[in-house]
Image (cartoon, rainbow, N blue to C red):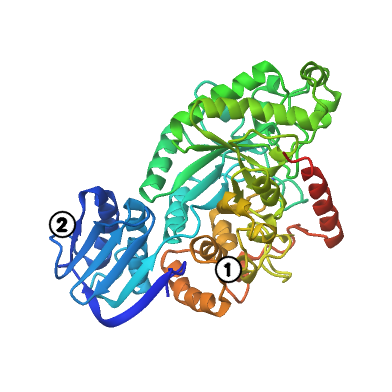
Amino acid sequence: MIVPKPARFETRLGRFVLDRETALAADPALGEVAAWLRGELSPVTGGQLLPGRPGPGTITLGLDDLAPEAYRLTVAPDGIEIDAGGPAGAFYGAQTLRQLMPAAAFRRGAAGGPLELPAVHVQDAPRFAWRGAILDVARHFMTKGDLLRFIDLMAVHKLNVLHLHLSDDQGWRIEIKRYPRLTEVGSWRKESQVGWMGEMDGRPHGGYYTQDDVREIVAYAARRHIRVVPEIDLPGHTQAAIAAYPELGNLDTPIEVSGTWGIGSNVLNVEDATIAFFKNVLDEVLELFPSPYICVGGDECPKDQWRTSPSAQRRIRELGLRDEDELQSWFIHQFDDYLAARGRRLVGWDEILEGGLAPGAVVASWRADLGAVAAARSGHDVINCANTSVYFDYRQSERDDEPVPFGTVLTLDDVYAFEPVPAELRGDPAAAHVLGAQCGIWTELIDSNRRIDYMAFPRLAAFAETVWSGPERDLPGFRARLAAHLPRLDALGVEYRHESGPLPWQTRPGVPGRPEDPDAWQATIDAWTSNLRNAR
Ligand code: ACM
């Protein structure tokens, strides 16, 4: 009853008793995994899992000739062995081991007594290398403590990429020493819109991570084999930065950090000084995030201000560009070259395909499957973040009492049915460009950690199976595994959505949402498809 489902799982006769005397032996290369496992299990058994020798009564972590993320786990009456291709595989084996324990083992210090584990043999490895979650900490800030908790929850589900959306119109969330106003001014807004179209709430909202916070978050995630991919969204979704430094924008009048939602018209200008500014920002970002992948956004950049800006028009003429789409493409290229020269790969939303894209860039495809197909066919690696399947800000049922209904309905079963390789690419060698997938937790309408719990869980468990487990789907089997998994989430204090619908305090009557209008939706898909015809 493991989530995500392992590749092979066999039950055997007998059981292992984990108690205060249980020891832990680890290959020296797996010392960090052993330390992590000791930290998780000691409060459960009341023992210390002292370093022991491989043998009876011991949990042994070893290396074998397997892929780095693959592991074999054997629980037998006389001992437990995890053999892995590397530290990540050993970590995933240890996560599976925890799930063999009663759910109470996920409560710190709750049990304190011997635990019985069934004898099993598990062989496991992930299907995709990129198993991510996008967390939008720009629209609503998430405290560092809540973020670390979320990282632990990702690790339970064997996800390995946290895509942190650090900047947007509504907030700038990372300290940049060279430009202190980005956080002094850009990290808070005076008030926020209630729901999608409601009144302003009259309450300031804000917060940011210091560079020390970021180092801590990145290190905490790395110990859990999660890479943090930062996103600094350019050239649209930049109103908070422009509020802090008006010279980055196209207007003569100062603007404020936005408190309303939607696609903002205030975008960066295309001056050399603005490009230099963001290269300086990226210099500090690269210092903090060792990720080989750095996201510069590139989505939803309205071109109206560029159409009327003399300097943008001059730039188009000087460079001999066709239009504002090519100007955006040129703008993104500045950062592609910059990152490539520093050994990193640019990640951008699928709009970066419109007007041409540099060869090494990776596409985060969010507009249904369209960007994924276009990107893979044009030779780009792609991460499937399809809003039609894995956007967790979208409502979870048709019910009227879902909190802040938004988007199309994406039920737990819909998420479980998600296939990261688009149907159009099946059988096509270009499918090899699909590195994996990311679920999206966008937070315009998710204003607290409790609401993130409600929107993300248990859909994130279904998503985890789509990226970790094989391509076949078995909904009754998944639901049976989930029934065993929910008590683990309860023990971890996750306020997930119950099958019966929102609990009384989880609804938000009267807060305006934005359910998808099917006709408008088709028109949107048609427009996206036509824009992506220019993909190169
Ligand atoms: C996005 O949802 N605009 C990436």
Q: Pointer 1: what residue?
A: 497
Sequence order check: which comes first, mark 2 or mark 1? 2
Label 2 within 8 A of ligand 1 by Cβ = no
Residue 61 shows in this picture: yes
Q: Residues within 10 Å of mark 2 (few under 14, many from 20)?
A: some
Give the left or right position of residue 153, taking residue 72 as reference.
right
- Where's residue 404, x and y in %? 70, 60
Please name which of the two marks, 2 or 1, marks the residue nearer to the observer.
2
Foreground of the two, 217 or 336: 336
Foreground of the two, 224 or 247: 224
Q: Residues within 10 Å of mark 1 (few under 14, many from 20)?
A: many
Mark on residue 174? none
| Residue in view at x 75 percent, y 34 percent | 355
Label 1 within 8 A of ligand 1 by Cβ = no
* Residue 206, picture quadrant: top right
Mark on residue 51? 2
